[in-house]
Image (cartoon, grey):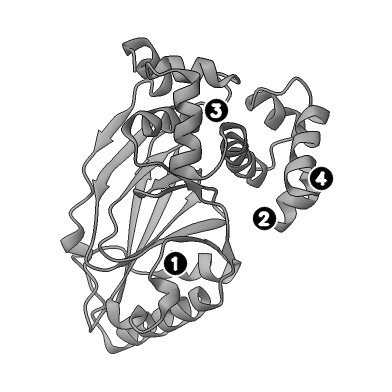
Amino acid sequence: MSKTAAAAASPHRTSLPPADPRRYAPTPERPLRGKARLMENQMDIQPHHHEWGQLVFSISGAVRVSTSAHTYIVPPSRAVWIPRRVVHAVSAIERAHLRTLYLHSRLTDGDATWSHSRVLEVSPLLRELVLQLPLDPEAPPATPAERERERCITHLVVDELGRARSLRLGVALPQDKRLRRLCEAMIAAPARHQALADWAAEVGASERTVSRLFREQLGTGYAQWRTQVLLAHALSMAAKQKPMSHIAAELGYASASAFSAMVTRTVGMPPSRFFAEA
């Protein structure tokens, strides 16, 4: 990718290491731990992994969570589950108040549903429970009443997670380095180009080569994959009550009706219904 293209894809990004996770490590005695972090727009938390499962969502603002195989654009009403030892990175699409839950393996072992990354719906109850979790690693519950309260919150959080609806909102990512760079650039700024030839030029490949890589690496064509990226961005904006005209313009559509036609053609329902159901 050229320097100009790289700058356009990632202006003024700040890349930081993860906060020391050992301070928040879950234990058999405290199997659920909570952590808060403010992420400014264009801030990245570098790829890393944990020896425990992790739930990521934000109280406000949207974040992007990426693993080697998928990327998830997550508004506040959604969360991403990341199994233990899965390498992942987090990026702020806008200023976000991030919340992270760390779950000890005894809470998830034996249940296959926790063995793969997925997007979960965040119920109002789950959101409020997370807000009540102690966040200071240096000040654990000191009294029997405080410890019992944390135990009850832990039980309810795990129960709510077990009831949470899984959502198919992930966008598949390729392993080929050239195509990966192209896909990352598209996710960062999906409206910058429409034609595959323009995207291919950014990674120094021919349109024919990139088209072949899409089919081989992702099992789909460029247009279908780009549509999934556009829908993911649209969902994030819709969750913030952005008007349809604003969403359409942000994604490069000439009008709200043109954007609405794309959504209806792709998912078989108008945007209002799709956003409500998704």
At a point 43% along the width and 69% down the height, the residue shown is 132
Q: What's the amino acid at mark 3?
A: Pro
Query: What percent of the width, then of the height, locates residue 216?
Result: 45, 41
The answer to whether the residue labelled 3 contacts the one labelled 2, judged by CB atoms less than 8 Å apart, is no
Query: What percent of the width, then of the height, locates residue 15?
Result: 27, 34
Give SS at disc 1.
helix
Give SS at disc 2.
loop
Which labelled disc corresponds to residue 130? 1
The answer to whether the residue labelled 1 contacts the one labelled 4, judged by CB atoms less than 8 Å apart, is no
Q: What's the amino acid at mark 4?
A: Pro
Q: Earlier in the sequence, mark 2 or mark 4?
A: 4
Query: What percent of the width, then of the height, locates residue 101?
Result: 36, 65
Q: Earlier in the sequence, mark 1 or mark 4?
A: 1
The answer to whether the residue labelled 3 contacts the one labelled 4, judged by CB atoms less than 8 Å apart, is no
Quadrant housing residue 45: top left
Would you say 1 lies left or right of 60 here?
A: left
Q: Earlier in the sequence, mark 3 or mark 4?
A: 3
Give SS at disc 4.
loop
Viewer-side residue, 268 vs 232: 268
Q: What's the amino acid at mark 1?
A: Val
Residue assigned mark 4:
270
Q: Earlier in the sequence, mark 2 or mark 1?
A: 1
Q: Calculate the distance from the C-alpha at mark 2 to the C-alpha at mark 1.
A: 22 Å
Would you say 151 lies left or right of 126 here?
A: left
Q: Calculate the distance from the C-alpha at mark 3 to the C-alpha at mark 1.
A: 33 Å
The answer to whether the residue labelled 2 contacts the one labelled 4, judged by CB atoms less than 8 Å apart, is no
Which labelled disc corresponds to residue 190? 3
Residue assigned mark 2:
278
Quadrant holding the N terminus: top left
Q: What's the amino acid at mark 2?
A: Ala
Q: Earlier in the sequence, mark 3 or mark 1?
A: 1
Query: Which mark is nearer the camera, 1 or 4?
Result: 4
